[in-house]
Amino acid sequence: MLNGKRILLIVAGGIAAFKSLELIRRLRERGASVRCVLTEAGAKFVTPLSLQALSEDRVYSDMFSLTDESEMGHIQLSRDADLLVVAPATANVLARMAAGLADDLAATVLLATDKPVLVAPAMNVRMWTHAATVANVETLKKRGINFVGPNDGAMACNEFGPGRMSEPEEIVAATAALLAPQEKPLAGKRAVVTSGPTREAIDPVRYISNHSSGKQGHAIASALASLGADVTLVSGPVTLADPPGLRTVHVDSAEQMLAACLSAGRIDVAVCAAAVADWKAARPATAKIKKKADAAPPALELVPNPDILATLSRPGPQRPALVVGFAAETENLVANAIEKRQRKGCDWIVANDVSPAAGTFGGESNTVHLISAAGVEDWPTLAKGDVALRLAGRIARHFGRPAKAEAAE
Ligand code: CTP
């Protein structure tokens, strides 16, 4: 199942390094070729000779070795593989990856690669749960690094908990899943997704905005991209990282968001998940508005913002084949959303409850209803990522090319 696949295995310094020998054997049994990079600390646990014997290839360890560089430069080493696997990935390796260091061959290869990376962490339970490691793992996941494990269990240091490296067979399974041909039912389709809040200036230091985190919109953009769509994410100010594998355009105001959507050119699907401010200041002040002891507080005159969803839904040759809006409601959710779909002229509405008790704004999960001309579908409470995948699957089905997961529902 891994026939002809080339794995670059990076072995770092941990007691679990002995399992990497078994990992090489099992990867090769499945038809993959394995080439190893051994860190200095890794060499304290396994010898280059054992890695070389099992991989039947030379082992690379020295960044500045003339022989290594003449045979295979470190850039080529990082590119000449289908997948990089770091096993064991110690706390130190994860920290160096997160910081973007290039202080040895392993770190340099990881920084220079344009290939997917799978890491199998292995460390003491306290190191794994330390805030520094937790933050590093989060950073790496956001950048698209794939993780397998760690597992719970007794460790060499006599402690118990998460930190044991996954078993070789689990790492092989994760490798196979990453290298399996991906279904791309939205290949060739162009999508625009709006996400996050907008900010409407009152003066150079003050603005009107809302609590949208952008999590749902960003997840939808990623899900569409994972199904092969060419995605432009138009994001208001959020603290999320730009998702990998798509184009992100950063905007502040509703006007800018609309302009960015319109300049994306011909698109097949638009998903408006942004919480666009409905109003903006009629005349934003060009200088900071000062308090005056004897004057009343300033009155803020508001004017409506353009409605991006309604604009994109307008009939005409430019209209995307599918326009999806969201309805953020605090009461009469479904009835308001049905009315909103008609008023805005979009095809589907994803209705979600944004009352504080529902915890949707900034939260990790969402309970939504999908409203279309065909009726109302109630979806179970799902993580925002799963809502996104399900919606992307629905979109693929709309274009006549079901994604496997969606078809299996
Ligand atoms: N929307 C938009 N541009 C606006 C306002 C809203 O594109 N100026 C989009 C949102 O991205 C969402 C949908 O319209 O997809 C509905 O947003 P919502 O805030 O629920 O509705 P409103 O238009 O604000 O209507 P109401 O105030 O009646 O709830």
Image: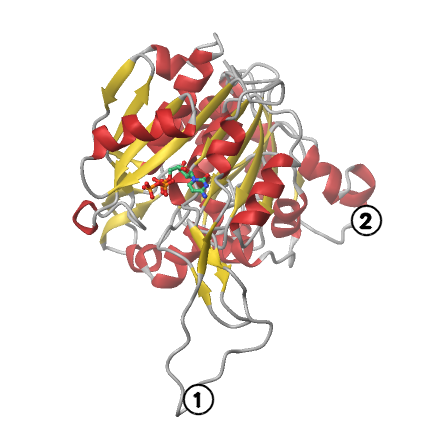
Which of the 4 image quadrants contains residue 131?
A: bottom left
Instruction: Single out the mark in the foreground, 1 or 2.
Output: 1
Q: Is residue 156 visible?
A: yes
Q: Secondary structure at mark 1?
A: loop
**Residue at (59%, 20%) from the top-left corner?**
316
* Mark carried by residue 123: none
Helix, strand or loop at mark 2: helix
Rendering coords of residue 285 (x, y %): 55, 71
Residue 313 in percent (x, y) is at 50, 26
Q: Would residue 131 appear left or right of 197 to someone viewing this image?
A: left
User: Which residue is located at x 55 percent, y 53 percent?
Assistant: 97
Observer-nearest of 53 and 334: 334
Taking the spot 44% from the left edge, 89% from the top edge, the residue there is 292
In three-dimensional space, the C-alpha distance between marks 1 and 2, rounded to whole angstroms, equals 73 Å
Q: Quadrant of ligand 1?
A: top left
User: In this view of the protein, which residue sits in the foreground, 116 or 240?
Assistant: 240
- Residue picked out by circle 2: 66
